[in-house]
């Protein structure tokens, strides 16, 4: 198992209600990949109970904010979108999906822009000291992404296997390599998914070859 650091995370920033877990959802943060501190401090500063269970930094260290038996908001699927797509329980389906899922964040700048010979993150800063991938075909509006490190991918795999075994979650879903919008994810079908499985406006996670190969190896 990777190194796991327990975060001193306020109990009022997530819901201390035990819920049955059916899904594991992968995200990336769009933030400094070398430190989870900024992400965690941001969550602490807001009242919406938005937080993931895990944040994995570039070196593969796993920061655990709270126990996976509890839940917080991390998907943000709107009731209007759910209603437009025929869900009778559109008013509370987002809450159900959050309650039923374990969220894993990969610390990453995510989608990048390229200009004047440099790569820029979403906040206009120059990106340094990480690998950048140029996609043959743009993904969710981006041609360039910061690559997830192998240490991060290894830690994601370890956490998925541990939590899937603990909560009896089947290794299906994006283990088929498909990160597009998925009805099985939205329908609460047990399995492993990506933020992109629930929302067409999100780009996390992106289809980096190494993480897709890891996911496929879980089947």
Image (spheres, rainbow, N blue to C red):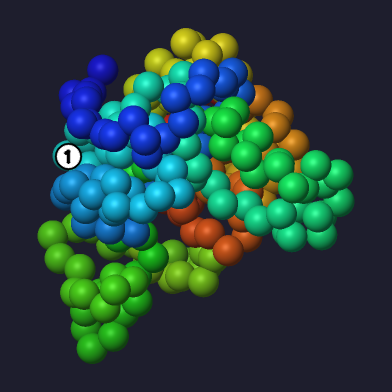
Q: Quadrant of the N terminus?
A: top left
Q: Position of residue 41 (x, y in %)?
A: 23, 49
The answer to which of 7 and 206 lies nearer the viewer is 7
x 49%, y 59%: residue: 203
User: Quarter holding the C terminus?
Assistant: top right
- Would residue 34 appear left or right of 45 to someone viewing this image? left
| Residue at 44 percent of width and 65 percent of height | 135
Mark 1 secondary-structure assignment: loop
Residue 206 in the image: state x and y as whole percent: 46, 53
Rendered residue at 59%/18% (across/down): 20
Which quadrant of the view contains residue 31? bottom left
- Left or right position of 99 against 130: right
Along the horizontal axis of the image, is 93 left or right of 149? right
Residue 24 in sight: yes
Q: Which residue in the structure is indicated by mark 1?
A: 59
| Label 1 Cα neighbours within 10 Å, binned few <14 / some 14-19 / many ≥20 | some
As drawn, 179 above or below 214: below
Q: Position of residue 9 (x, y in %)?
A: 26, 34
Residue at left offset 58%, top offset 63%: 201
């Amino acid at each position: 198992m990777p190194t796991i650091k327990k975060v001193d995370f306020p109990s009022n920033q997530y819901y201390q209600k035990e819920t049955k877990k059916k899904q594991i959802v992968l995200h990336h943060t769009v933030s400094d990949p070398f430190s989870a501190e900024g992400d965690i401090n941001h969550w602490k500063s807001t009242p919406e109970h938005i937080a993931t269970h895990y944040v994995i930094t570039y070196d593969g260290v796993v920061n655990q904010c709270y126990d996976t038996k509890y839940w917080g908001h991390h998907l943000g699927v709107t009731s209007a979108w759910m209603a437009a797509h025929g869900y009778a329980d559109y008013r509370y389906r987002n809450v159900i999906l959050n309650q039923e899922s374990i969220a894993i964040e990969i610390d990453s700048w995510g989608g990048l822009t390229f200009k004047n010979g440099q790569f820029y993150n979403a906040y206009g800063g120059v990106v340094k000291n990480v690998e950048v991938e140029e996609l043959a075909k743009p993904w969710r509006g981006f041609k360039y992404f910061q690559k997830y490190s192998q240490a991060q991918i290894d830690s994601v795999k370890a956490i998925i296997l541990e939590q899937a075994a603990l909560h009896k979650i089947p290794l299906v879903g994006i283990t088929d390599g498909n990160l597009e919008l998925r009805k099985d994810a939205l329908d609460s079908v047990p399995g492993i998914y990506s933020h992109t499985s629930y929302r067409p406006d999100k780009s996390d996670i992106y289809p980096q070859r190494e993480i897709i190969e890891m996911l496929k190896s879980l089947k």
